[in-house]
Image: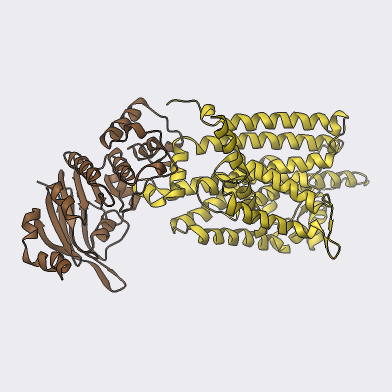
């Protein structure tokens, strides 16, 4: 099976600190993957590289069926290629309604003049309602996003990603600050999304990762330490030493 | 869901209706109809105020909606004024020169006429040659084109360089201040070709209409300014509503989010910066014929800072707020500094408003920023809330 995203031999250094060290990691077209690792393991930097925010010093990032390199592309170009990103802090447009937030994200032409002449259509309206249904915000479409609870904002941001119809969703700590009930719903949303695309979740919370029930990649000091099921990686002695062991120490 | 544009933007109809009523009322009460309650000079003040309202809504779009605190939009306003001023001054001098040379027994050659015009215009800076930038000054159409072309080109080049390098926030504000300062310093030079610190004068006279009274001309410019403000309001209301408005406000509130949604943020900023620069240029082109004179001091950095103060006091992020702020503060300013406001005698000290107005303005700016961040326009929210 050909890969959706192939990251190989990527390194990046910030002021002498090697945040990513010869990292190689691949994602299939449809899969759910969790990336875990202690603080400073390079999880967020990895996302920054894939989404074009950070340029690596060396290595390759190859994307899609046409095997194009993402390096040298701008953030907005990469997003248009089909990579959606959810930030750690929920970032939605708080001054605008839930509907407007989703409408902005819909996969429509992105140029200023196309947007200026943009007309609302029934099919786009239906898409917005479908996404709102999926993230449980159907009743809140006319509410201002700033009024939403923390959990609802997280869902709205995931909804914005879904509206964008990405082929790869990078989701940074979606369950942070959520109640147990909200976490369960978030798990469902992500699992559902991963049926038709690749969803990569960066998470600290082991319980949440266990519930996702997917392949896990452990990052440590900027490279892959272990990969496999959660049980497999948590029984790995090096993982226990660097990650779990540290908590006991 | 498919509500009409006016239903979504009720302020557009209100502003246009108010403008229409105001324009008719001022015209009826002016010298033109013989009623003469409003003097010609006050008609000019009101017309100029409308132009300031027009640049204020442009400022509100770039700052209040897109989050770019430009402290250089008066540069575009000044360029618009200079562009139209060049034609006004050239064409009027030409009329005068031809008239005076016609009295000579031998008809003047074109080069003699041209030299005489050059002498009249540039004698004050010790020159009589036309600098290259006056190449189109004899054509009204081309100079009107310059009103739009020069500000848009400057905005495009400046904006492209600044936004591409992702200069934001206070750094961008400083750059825009530098831009308008550089323009002022350039214009101050005698060899800039725009008469140095003398600027362009006599702009209140429209060439070819020497026998039309200033009362009539002032009303024509007043009406033109009102129409421009109405059209500008409509244009900006359209731009900031709908999806464009959504994206632009998104850039203001969270640039990175917009970028990661696949929008090329820089193009949007450049679009907004350039469109507002063009409108500022048009506002300037209408303002200076009413003011009668333009000089480099007009594009000094402080002018653009005032503009930001008007918009902040009026309430940014709402177009009518900018209109209210610009009209209120600039009229109040001319009342205080024009000697309209009575001095206050404290016994030991006399507060003279010509000196103290700036202090009052500064204090109100601080007070509004701290206590009423929504500005005067925010009062309308209270009204609407009470009704519902």
Can you say whether A11 is above or below B95 in the image? below
Q: Residue furthest bottom?
A: A16
In the figure, is residue A163 to the left or right of B25?
A: left
Q: Colour of chain B?
A: yellow
* Quarter of the C terminus of chain A within the rendering: bottom left
Residue B52 visible? The answer is no
Could you tell me residue B363's position as x and y percent? 67, 57
Nearest the eye: A57 or B341: B341
- Name the residue located 70 percent from the left edge and 52 percent from the top edge: B134
Can you say whether A187 is above or below B344 in the image? above
Can you say whether A164 is above or below A49 in the image? above
Could you tell me residue A175's position as x and y percent? 25, 49
- Name the residue located 30 percent from the left edge and 38 percent from the top edge: A163
Nearest the eye: A216 or A82: A216
Nearest the eye: B267 or B304: B304
Q: Colour of chain A?
A: brown
Could you tell me residue B298's position as x and y percent? 71, 55
Could you tell me residue B91's position as x and y percent? 78, 44
- Name the residue located 29 percent from the left edge and 53 percent from the top edge: A51
């Amino acid at each position: 099976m050909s890969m959706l995203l192939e990251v190989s031999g990527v390194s990046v250094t910030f002021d002498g600190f090697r945040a990513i060290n010869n990292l190689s990691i691949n994602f299939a077209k449809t899969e759910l993957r969790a990336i875990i690792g202690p603080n400073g393991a390079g999880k967020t930097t990895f996302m920054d590289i894939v989404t074009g925010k950070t340029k690596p010093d060396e290595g390759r990032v190859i994307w899609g069926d046409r095997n194009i390199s993402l390096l040298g592309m701008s953030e907005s170009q990469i997003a248009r290629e089909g990579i959606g990103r959810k930030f750690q802090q929920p970032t939605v447009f708080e001054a605008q309604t839930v509907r407007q937030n989703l409408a902005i994200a819909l996969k429509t032409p992105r140029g200023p003049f196309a947007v200026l002449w943009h007309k609302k259509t029934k099919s786009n309206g239906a898409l917005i309602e479908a996404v709102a249904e999926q993230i449980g915000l159907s009743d809140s479409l006319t509410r201002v996003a700033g009024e939403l609870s923390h959990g609802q904002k997280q869902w709205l941001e995931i909804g914005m990603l879904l509206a964008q119809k990405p082929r790869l969703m990078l989701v940074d700590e979606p369950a942070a600050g959520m109640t147990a009930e909200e976490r369960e719903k978030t798990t469902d949303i992500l699992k559902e999304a991963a049926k038709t695309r690749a969803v990569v979740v960066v998470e600290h919370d082991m319980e949440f990762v266990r519930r996702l029930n997917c392949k896990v990649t452990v990052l440590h000091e900027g490279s892959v330490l272990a990969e496999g099921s959660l049980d497999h990686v948590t029984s790995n002695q090096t993982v226990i030493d660097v990650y779990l062991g540290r908590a006991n120490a | 869901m498919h509500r009409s544009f006016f239903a979504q933007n009720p302020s557009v109809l209100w502003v246009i209706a108010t403008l229409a009523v105001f324009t008719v009322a001022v015209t009826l009460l002016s010298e033109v109809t013989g009623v003469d309650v409003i003097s010609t000079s006050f008609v000019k003040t009101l017309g100029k105020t409308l132009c300031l309202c027009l640049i204020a809504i442009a400022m509100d779009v770039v700052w209040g909606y897109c989050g770019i605190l430009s402290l250089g939009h008066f540069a575009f306003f000044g360029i618009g004024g200079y562009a139209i001023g060049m034609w006004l001054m050239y064409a009027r001098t030409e009329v005068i020169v031809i008239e005076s040379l016609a009295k000579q027994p031998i008809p003047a050659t074109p080069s003699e006429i041209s030299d005489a015009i050059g002498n009249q215009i540039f004698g004050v800076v010790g020159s009589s040659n036309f600098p290259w930038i006056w190449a189109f000054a004899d054509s009204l159409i081309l100079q009107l084109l310059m009103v739009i072309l020069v500000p848009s080109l400057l905005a495009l080049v400046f904006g492209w360089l600044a936004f591409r390098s992702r200069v934001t926030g206070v750094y961008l504000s400083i750059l825009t201040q530098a831009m308008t300062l550089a323009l002022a310093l350039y214009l101050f030079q005698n060899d800039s070709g725009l008469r140095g610190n003398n600027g362009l004068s006599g702009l209140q006279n429209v060439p070819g209409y020497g026998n039309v009274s200033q009362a009539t001309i002032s009303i024509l410019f007043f009406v033109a300014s009102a129409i421009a403000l109405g059209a500008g309001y409509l244009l900006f209301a359209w731009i900031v509503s709908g999806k464009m408005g959504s994206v632009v406000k998104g850039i203001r509130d969270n640039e990175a989010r917009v970028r990661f949604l696949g929008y090329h943020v820089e193009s949007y900023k450049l679009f907004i910066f350039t469109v507002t620069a063009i409108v500022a240029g048009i506002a300037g082109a209408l303002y200076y014929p009413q003011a009668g004179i333009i000089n480099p001091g007009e594009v000094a950095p402080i002018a653009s800072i005032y503009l930001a103060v008007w918009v902040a006091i009026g309430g940014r992020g709402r177009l009518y707020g900018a209109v209210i702020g610009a009209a209120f503060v600039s009229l109040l300013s001319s009342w205080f500094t024009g000697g309209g406001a009575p001095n206050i005698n404290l016994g030991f000290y006399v507060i003279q408003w010509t000196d103290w107005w700036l202090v009052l303005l500064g204090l109100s700016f601080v007070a509004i920023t701290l206590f009423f961040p929504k500005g005067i326009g925010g009062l309308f929210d209270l009204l609407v809330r009470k009704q519902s």
